[in-house]
Amino acid sequence: MKKNALVVSSLILLTSAALAGCGSSPENNSNNSTDDKPIEITFRHALIGERRQGTLDLTMEAVKKMEAEVPGLTVKMDGVDGEVNRKDKIRGEMASGNVPEIFDAFGSPDVKTFAKEGKVLDITPILDELGIKDKFLNLDAWTLDGKVYGLPMSASAEGVFYNKEYFASKGFEVPTTYDELLTLMDKIKADGKIPFSAGSKSAWVPLMLTNQIWSRTAGPEVTAKFSTGEAKWTDPAITEAFKVHQDWVNKGYFKKGELGFEYVDYNTQFINGESAMMFDGSWAASLFQEGGAGISLAGKVGFFNFPPMPGGVGDQTSIMQDMNNGYAFSADVANNPRKLDAVKSFIKNFYTEEMQMRFLVERGSLPCIKLDEAKVQEQVKDPMMKELMTMLLHTKSSYAAFDALVPADVTTEIGTQIQKIVSNTTTPEKATAAIQKVQDEANAEAE
């Protein structure tokens, strides 16, 4: 898979027309069937809980337009936890052949695997018909053999959120080197606060940080090399990253008992002032906007890139950016003209300049399509989002999250091992050896 190339210079490329006006509408092009008898499709999403209600509300606007444009259509909204959907539910449905017409998905490796099995819809003709294929910043994660099998919901980037008010009160500055970061964490701990939020009950949460560290110690391109055998998890630079994470745990840079904390607890530690920093995705910006749990911190939160590490490999400003989470569509939709109309309508109404701008402004989600520079500058008022975009502008390269580049079984094993690292029930050497064993098995199966 090609490295995600999202950068802000791409984000603000001029586009002369809003997507809503592009292409033909389903109601004008889809009279393959005049049947307006009631018909139902299932829309599987992972927008559950109060935290994601605002994103669901925006999504429902496109869903309602879809229902209005396709006579007799009813959309059954099916909310499922993202991890449960990805690891269990959608896999079972793929095996049984009972796949939701529209479903939350990861482009790589999941959708690409399903596409090889003929289980997901090739939407390339739809994108061509609507005239929007070239509007997307990057569809690599969703493309197989030149065909597109799904679309990202938005883009994301990961870095360090920090409490600007607290930093200013203590005279702390944003670290520009790893040694400065270590010194900063010691000062924060001495002041009685937790340097970084912690919540490792769900393994993906601590792995955001570990993934960033090994992308410094071993280089941003390394994760893509595990499945080809060009790199191994047991390589010293990878083992070093797990050692760094374990050292941070042992030095008290995280709250004790983190294996019992959920992601919401992770965010709460930062919001209530227990922690001074939080390594998280750009989606967390919504916490500090209207309706967010951290609205009291609006205007008081900053964002910075993880600093370079001594002896690090490759671009030390590289940041995780991807467009790997979004929606795919059941291949069976192609057999029903009205369901195909519904999919066209959803794509037409969801992937517009207006909608993506609203996700950016209202939800803090980076857009996955090209937006007009003048409109971005005019509408984005949040200082933190401006700071984030400025940082992205000066980032030379990016890397995709590990779970977009390795098989699901390897992802599961990485999660198991990071939780053992956190609990000090294994060593970095044993952890990476266990991961490499599963990677070897996966690589052998792929041959």
Image: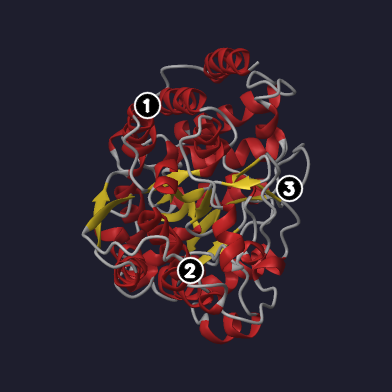
* Image coordinates for residue 94, horizontal then vertical, percent: 38, 31
Residue 422 appears in the rendering: yes
User: Which of the 4 image quarters holds residue 51?
Assistant: bottom left
**Disc nearer the start of the sequence (2/1):** 2
Residue 256 appears in the rendering: no
Mark 2: secondary structure: helix
Please identify the quadrant where the C terminus is shown.
top right
Q: Amino acid at mark 2?
A: Asn
Instruction: Return the mark for residue 436.
Output: none
Q: Amino acid at mark 1?
A: Ala
Measure the alpha-carbon separation of dots 2 and 1. 33 Å
Q: Residue at x 54, y 79 (%)?
A: 21
Please identify the quadrant where the N terminus is shown.
top right
**Disc nearer the start of the sequence (3/2):** 2
| Tag 3 near tag 2, CB within 8 Å | no
Q: Nearer the viewer, residue 197 or 94?
A: 94
Q: Nearer the viewer, mark 1 or mark 3?
A: 1
| Tag 2 near tag 1, CB within 8 Å | no
* Image coordinates for residue 245, horizontal then vertical, percent: 53, 33
Measure the alpha-carbon separation of dots 3 and 2. 49 Å
Dot 2 corresponds to which residue?
29
As drawn, is 2 to the left or to the right of 129? Answer: right
Report how many numbered discs are placed on residues in the image.
Answer: 3
Within 10 Å of the Cα at label 3, are there few (<14), some (14-19), or many (20+) other Cα atoms?
many
Q: Residue at x 39, y 37 (%)?
A: 86
Measure the alpha-carbon separation of dots 1 and 3. 42 Å
In the displayed structure, would residue 130 be above or below residue 323? below
In the displayed structure, would residue 251 be above or below residue 152? above
Dot 3 corresponds to which residue?
316
User: Which of the 4 image quarters holds residue 297?
Assistant: bottom left
Q: Residue at x 73, y 52 (%)?
A: 397
Dot 1 corresponds to which residue?
95
